[in-house]
Image (cartoon, rainbow, N blue to C red):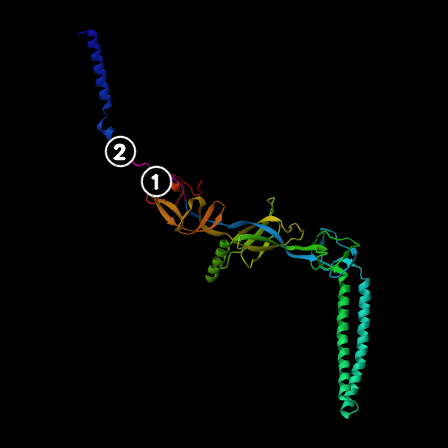
């Protein structure tokens, strides 16, 4: 046998023996590997500690500015404009003279009406005197019954003419008053659709446009449309608190302008609209604001902001830790590394946090990250517990 081949076979055998010995682990190493393979991998979650804190609940809703009063100023008579005193866009006071119309024809009409009334009163006096005499003559047979009836009818006609003449005089006096147009309330006036010398008349197909618009700007409304569900919850909560003898916490209402600046005046809640919008399922809330400088204009898009004046104390947790199913809102808590479900009643939101009215106690460890990966009864590994959820 070839000596070289024997030597190679021996070397190969030694190498094979050493490899076989190296592959044979100790019994305790095999047991450790088995335990490692059988040990479950724990899901990792992040938690926060439920804590009560003081805060001032607030809210923001988009709103539109609307005038409390708007008037379309029109002429009540047909006449020529002789003077106008308003400047477009200016603020006017109630009773300010805005326009004068030519009064010459109405002066004549008033004088004629006064004359007719005087004549009617004179005729009536004569007819009443005749009736008085007839009442003494008719019983004595000096005048017939037919003559008496005619005298009485003449007296009645004379009285009717007085009433008709008085009505004509009132109309003439009103026409005279209509030759001067005054502001019915304080407000901002629009540009006029007429000039001095124009012939104007009451609203008609010939002249449908008003002379100008007058808008009352102080105070003014901010109209915010809320979901009917929000309205229902508010009313039900108010009734609940009333039954408990508790007043609704006072609110401070304001406006945030489109540039982010807060309007300097505070608002007062006026009322809810008397009907909900069927198409949008919303209802309008009206809040009045002082507007002495006329900064807020009808159609202005703003944001109504509200905040409870007095601080309240509630258990607060991050909104992302709260889930919802058919049973309602719930959270997952951890105690001794075991996950449990707790149904909760949520309240108002404050930034990224949600107030919890019922269902949690201070000190509960609430899962904020990994909620979707665990189920009640699971054992978990807590990566971080932070009172602020950070």
The residue under label 1 is 380
* Residue 364, visible in the rendered structure: no
In the displayed structure image, the side of residue 81 where residue 55 appears, left or right: left
- Please provide the residue range marked out in magenta: 34-48
Along the viewing direction, whichever of 174 and 346 lies nearer the viewer: 174
* Residue 242, visible in the rendered structure: yes
Above or below residue 247? Residue 346 is above
Above or below residue 326? Residue 107 is below
The residue under label 2 is 35
Q: Position of residue 147 (x, y in %)?
A: 78, 86
Along the viewing direction, whichever of 136 and 222 lies nearer the viewer: 136
- Check the picture and name the quadrant holding the N terminus: top left
Q: Residues within 10 Å of mark 1 (few under 14, many from 20)?
A: many
Along the viewing direction, whichever of 94 and 47 lies nearer the viewer: 94
- The quarter of the picture where residue 137 lies is bottom right
Above or below residue 16? Residue 297 is below
């Amino acid at each position: 046998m070839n000596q070289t081949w024997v030597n190679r076979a021996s070397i190969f055998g030694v190498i094979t023996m050493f490899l076989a010995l190296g592959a044979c682990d100790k019994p305790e190493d095999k047991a450790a590997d088995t335990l490692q393979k059988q040990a479950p991998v724990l899901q990792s979650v992040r938690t926060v500690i439920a804590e009560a804190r003081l805060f001032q609940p607030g809210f923001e809703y988009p709103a539109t500015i609307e005038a409390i009063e708007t008037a379309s100023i029109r002429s009540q008579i047909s006449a020529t404009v002789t003077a106008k005193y308003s400047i477009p866009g200016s603020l006017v006071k109630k009773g300010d003279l805005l326009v004068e119309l030519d009064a010459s024809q109405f002066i004549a009409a008033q004088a004629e009406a006064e004359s007719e009334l005087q004549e009617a009163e004179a005729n009536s006096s004569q007819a009443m005197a005749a009736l008085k005499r007839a009442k003494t003559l008719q019983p004595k047979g000096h005048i017939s019954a037919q003559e008496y009836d005619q005298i009485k009818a003449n007296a009645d006609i004379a009285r009717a003419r007085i009433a008709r003449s008085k009505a004509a005089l009132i109309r003439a006096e009103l026409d005279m008053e209509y030759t001067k147009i005054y502001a019915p309330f304080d407000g901002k006036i629009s540009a006029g659709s007429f000039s001095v010398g124009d012939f104007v008349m009451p609203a008609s197909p010939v002249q449908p446009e008003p002379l100008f618009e007058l808008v009352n700007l102080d105070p003014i409304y901010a109209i915010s449309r809320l979901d009917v569900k929000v309205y229902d919850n508010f009313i039900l909560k108010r009734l609940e608190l009333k039954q408990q003898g508790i007043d609704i916490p006072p609110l401070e209402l304001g406006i945030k302008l489109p540039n982010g600046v807060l309007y300097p005046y505070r608002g007062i809640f006026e009322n809810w609209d008397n009907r909900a919008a069927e198409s949008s399922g919303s209802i309008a809330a009206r809040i009045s604001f002082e507007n002495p400088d006329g900064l807020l204009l009808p159609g202005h898009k703003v944001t109504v902001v509200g905040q409870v004046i007095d601080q309240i104390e509630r258990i607060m947790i991050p909104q992302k830790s709260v889930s919802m199913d058919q049973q309602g809102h719930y959270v997952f808590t951890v105690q001794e590394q075991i996950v449990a479900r707790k149904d909760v009643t949520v309240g108002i939101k404050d930034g990224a946090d949600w107030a919890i009215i019922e269902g949690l106690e201070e000190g509960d460890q609430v899962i904020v990250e990994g909620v979707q990966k665990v189920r009640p009864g699971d054992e978990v590994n807590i990566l971080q517990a932070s009172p602020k959820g950070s």
